[in-house]
């Protein structure tokens, strides 16, 4: 976000501010003075400690499985380590969570909630072309790839021949901002030639478990109902845990 956009966030006294890339440190005092709840998304323990240290109200621990810009640590390993590192700051789990099983597992890891992206890419309401939604639906578990091609930073996308060519070229990406400028003409040509399959299509490994386009409310309802079933019925019937006296 630019400084000018942040000024609007502060002027409008936005209720919740979530930062992804970068730290909200320069604005934290003014956001806090407005009563804005501050969520910070991180992909490793080092950055989790950094944002908890400046007063984030919650830390979103995002595993490498996630769609979009992402790190190297998987959700199952990352979430407990972040929880231990930033306690008592609440931690929200992200990356690869797309149904009730993922929600139940995240709660079992100690997360206070989950943060999803890929699952809602195929919501009826999602503001992206049907062709891109279809590519997410068509993708299997191995059909996403992390690349710096589109933004200069590591971003998980539905794989395509352009990403494959870039990765095998050994070329170094330019920093964020400049890489986008570098490939601007290429993206224009790709669009003109109708090769939408070569465009950026950020999505996570959970793409492989998505099967249809449906309303966001249905996705959310099934996720919550699925987790309630697992936590309230399936697991208690399968697992007998006797706490130590
Ligand atoms: C298409 C797409 C765009 C995203 N854009 C952003 C973004 O601008 N800022 C951000 O912090 N996270 C962004 N993310 C990451 C999400 O906030 C979220 O952490 C991630 O999708 C969770 O993993 P999942 O995709 O496995 O559900 C994006 C994710 C996707 C799929």
Image (cartoon, rainbow, N blue to C red):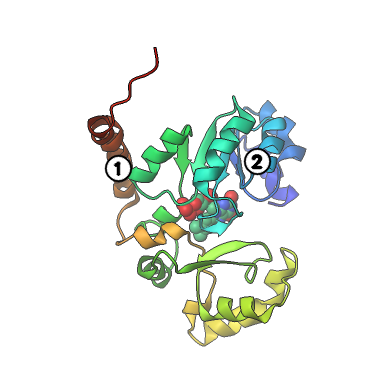
**Residue closest to the far top:** 245
Find residue 100 and report its image quarter.
top left
Displayed quadrant of residue 50: top right
Helix or strand or loop: what does disc 1 sit on?
helix
Q: Residues within 10 Å of mark 2 (few under 14, many from 20)?
A: some
* Left or right relative to 184: residue 160: left
Disc 1 crowd rating (10 Å Cα; few below 14, some 14-19, many 20+) is: few
Residue assigned mark 2? 45
Residue indicated by mark 1: 221
Q: Is the C terminus in the top left, top right, bottom left or bottom right quadrant?
A: top left
Q: Position of residue 44 (x, y in %)?
A: 64, 45
In this view of the protein, can residue 57 be seen by the observer?
A: no
| 1 is higher (above) or lower (below) than 164 | above
Residue 48 in the image, given as x and y percentages of width and height: 65, 39
Is the CB–ligand 1 distance for label 2 below 8 Å?
Answer: no
**Which residue is depicted at the point 77% across and 39% down?**
26
The reply to whether discs 2 and 1 touch (Cβ–Cβ < 8 Å) is no
């Amino acid at each position: 976000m630019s400084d000018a956009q942040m000024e609007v966030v502060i002027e409008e006294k936005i209720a919740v501010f979530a930062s992804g890339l970068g730290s909200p440190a320069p604005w934290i005092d003014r956001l806090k003075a407005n009563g804005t709840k501050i969520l910070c998304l991180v992909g490793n323990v080092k950055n989790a400690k950094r944002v908890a240290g400046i007063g984030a109200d919650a830390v979103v621990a995002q595993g490498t499985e996630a769609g979009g810009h992402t790190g190297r640590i998987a959700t199952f390993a990352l979430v407990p380590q972040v929880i231990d590192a930033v306690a008592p700051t609440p931690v929200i789990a992200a990356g690869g969570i797309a149904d009730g099983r993922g929600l139940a597992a995240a709660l079992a890891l100690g997360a206070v909630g989950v943060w999803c992206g890929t699952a809602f890419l195929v919501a009826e309401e999602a503001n992206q072309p049907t062709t891109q939604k279809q590519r997410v639906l068509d993708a299997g578990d191995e059909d996403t790839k992390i690349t710096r091609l589109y933004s200069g930073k590591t971003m998980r996308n539905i794989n395509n021949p352009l990403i494959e060519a870039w990765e095998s070229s050994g070329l170094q990406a330019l920093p964020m901002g400049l890489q986008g400028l570098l490939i601007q003409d290429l993206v224009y040509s790709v669009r003109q030639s109708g090769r939408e399959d070569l465009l950026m299509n950020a999505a996570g490994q959970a793409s492989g478990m998505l099967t249809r386009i449906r309303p966001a409310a249905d996705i959310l309802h099934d996720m919550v109902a699925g987790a309630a079933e697992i936590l309230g019925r399936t697991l208690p019937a399968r697992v007998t845990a006797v706490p130590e006296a």
